[in-house]
Image (spheres, helix red, strand yellow):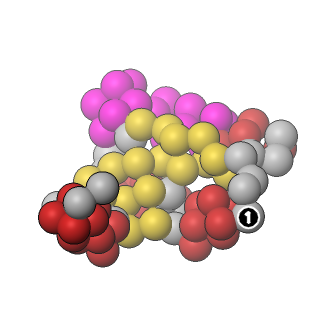
Amino acid sequence: MDRRTEDQNDSILVSLKIAPDVNDALLHGNPVVALESTIISHGMPYPQNLQTAKEVQAILKANGVVPATIAILDGVPCIGMSALSTSWIV
């Protein structure tokens, strides 16, 4: 990898917002599943969208997997979202 590519990768990583539980799981090699936020924002009607997202996350957690819902919030890519920020994208 050349220096320019490394610089581009560094700038991308700086602009990401990674939830602490997702970051910790990745650092320790624990399983993480990425979930799209589109099911919440426009994939299903409210409140079924939030209920479904919460159920999927609960199933993952019950099986030892860290859910990482991914969305762009205020122009920032967010990996792993709290219930509060998940509700915000409805």
Measuring 41% from the left and 48% from the top, which residue is drawn there? Answer: 70
Numbered marks: total: 1
Q: Position of residue 15 (x, y in %)?
A: 26, 70
The image shows residue 11, relative to residue 90, as above or below, that is: below
What are the residue bounds of the magenta stretch? 38-56
Measuring 29% from the left and 70% from the top, which residue is drawn there? Answer: 10
Q: Residues within 10 Å of mark 1 (few under 14, many from 20)?
A: few
The image shows residue 15, relative to residue 50, as above or below, that is: below
18 in the magenta segment: no
| Amino acid at circle 1 | His
Residue 67 appears in the picture as rendered:
yes
Please give left or right for residue 63 compared with residue 82 in the image. Answer: right
Residue 46 appears in the picture as rendered:
no
For this rendering, which residue is in front, 12 or 50? 12
Q: Position of residue 18 (x, y in %)?
A: 46, 66
Q: Position of residue 20 (x, y in %)?
A: 58, 72
Residue receiving disc 1: 28
Measuring 38% from the left and 40% from the top, which residue is drawn there? Answer: 37
